[in-house]
Image (cartoon, rainbow, N blue to C red):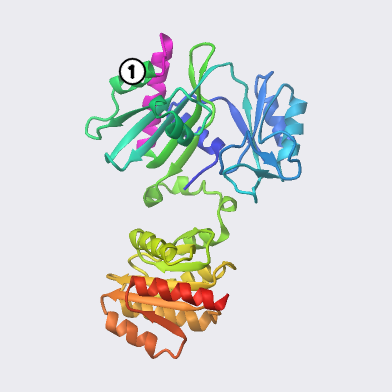
Amino acid sequence: MNIHEYQAKELLRRYGVAVLDGHVAWTPEEAEAAAKKLPGPVYVVKSQIHAGGRGAGRFADDPNGKGGVRVVKSVEDVKAAATAMIGHTLVTKQTGAQGKVVSRVYVEDGCDIKRELYLGLLVDRATSRITVMASTEGGMEIEEVAEHQPEKILKVAVDPASGLSGFHCRKLAFGLGLTGKQVGSFTKFVTALYGAFLELDCAIVEINPLVVTGAGEIVALDAKISFDDNALFRHKDLEALRDDSEMDPKELEAVKNDLNYVALDGEIGCMVNGAGLAMATMDIIKLYGSSPANFLDVGGTATADRVTEAFRIITSDANVKAILVNIFGGIAKCDMIATGVVQAAKNLTLKVPLVVRLEGTNVALGKQILAESGLAIIPADNLADAAEKVVNAVKKAA
C-alpha cells in the first residue's frame, strides 16, 4: 500500500526523522492559509499523487507550463500555483499518458540545499535482510543510477539479530563524502528511519532527494513509503491512510473482496491461485503468442462467491477477449473452484471464450462439474494445452 508524501512525512516526523515543515491543502485558499503558517520567504508547492517525476511532469491542459512541484517566493504565488494544480491532470513518466488528477497539494517551507543525496530502505530478498542503500546521485531515479553508474550505489545489509549499528551509518556517511557534524546528523537520521521502517512494517522507504543543508543538517526533501499489505492487519491506523482515488477501480474492488488483482495491457484475463502460478500462466500466454490483460489471484482459501466476484472484476476490463482459469487445487479444492466458475459463467452471461485448466485435489469431480454444466467451457489437460487453446480462441474471435 502506498501513501502520499505529506502522509509519509507526518509518520516519519513521529519517529524523529528530520523533515521540513509543511501543510496539506485541498483548495487554493487552504494553500494560501498554509503558506501563512510557514516562515517563508521561499515556499514549495507539491502536487500529491502516487507517482514519481512530479517536478518534471506537465499538466495535460498546459503541456508547456510548469511541473507538479513549484518553488515560489510569496503567499500569493502559493495560491496561484495551487490553483494551477488542484483539479488538473498531471502527466509524468510514471503515470502514463492518462495522468492523474491532483486533488491536493503540499505546501512546504523552503530549504537551503547544499547537496542532494539518495537514501532508501527495503527488504532485500536475496539476503533476507533490511538493506540500506545510499547514493551521491540524489534527485535521480535509483534505477537509472543502478544501470549507468552502479558504483555510485552504496549498500549495507542489517543483521536482524543485532539491528542497525553506528558503524553501518558511518560507513554510508563516509561513502557519501559527509564530514564533521554531517556524519552525526546522518547517523541520527538513518537510525530514526530504520526504527520507523521496522515498527511500521514497511516494504520500501525512499528519501529522494535527501539533502545536506547549508548548516550541515540532513533533511528529507521528499519521502515515499510503501507498506507490506500482509502486515496491515497490525496497523489499522495506516490502512486508513489509503487513498482509494489513486487506485484502479478494479484493483480497489479486488482489495475489498480479499483478492489480488493487477491490471496489464493485453487481451487474456487470467484467474489463478498463487503468485508463482500467475507468473507462469502469464509467461506461457506470451510464449504462445498473446499477452495477459490482467491477472487475478483468488488465493488458497477461495470460495465460490469469491470466484464469481473474481470473474466480475476480470470481465469489467473491456480489453479482455478471453479468460484462462488456471487453478491448482489444494485448500481451495477443484470441485469448489469448478462450482464457482459455473456459477459465475451463468450469473454474468460471459460473452468471451473461457478456458479452464484444473489440477490437484478433487480434480476429477471438478472436471465433471464443468462438463455437466451445459456451458461452452473449453477444458484443458495441462498448462501448455490451456495456453494454446485460449490464444487460439482469441484469434478465432478476432
Q: Can residue 381 be seen in this view?
A: yes
In-front residue for pair 87/149: 149
As for residue 68 lying within the magenta part, the answer is: no
Tell me which residue sits at (49%, 77%) in the image.
393
Locate residue 299: give its quadrant. Answer: bottom left
Dot 1 alpha-carbon crowd within 10 angstroms: few under 14, some 14 to 19, many 20 or more: some
Say if 95 sits above or below 222 in the image: below
Horizontal side of 20 relative to 191 (left or right) equals right
Tell me which residue sits at (59%, 19%) in the image.
111
The quadrant of the picture occupied by the C terminus is: bottom right
In-front residue for pair 177/88: 177
Tell me which residue sits at (54%, 69%) in the image.
320
- The residue tagged with tag 1: helix, strand or loop? helix
Horizontal side of 291 relative to 70 (left or right) equals left
Locate residue 65: give its quadrant. Answer: top right
Say if 319 sits above or below 93 in the image: below
Residue 211 x, y percent position in the rendering: 51, 21
Residue 131 x, y percent position in the rendering: 33, 33
Q: Which residue lies furthest to the left in this view?
A: 161
Tell me which residue sits at (46%, 45%) in the image.
238
Say if 280 sits above or below 120 in the image: below
Which amino acid type is marked by label 1? Arg
Q: Is the magenta stretch mostly helix, strand or loop?
A: helix
Residue 383 x, y percent position in the rendering: 34, 71
Q: Can residue 258 be seen in this view?
A: no
As for residue 185 lying within the magenta part, the answer is: yes
Report the residue marked by disc 1: 170
Q: Give the extent of the magenta segment.
A: 176-198
Residue 396 x, y percent position in the rendering: 53, 78
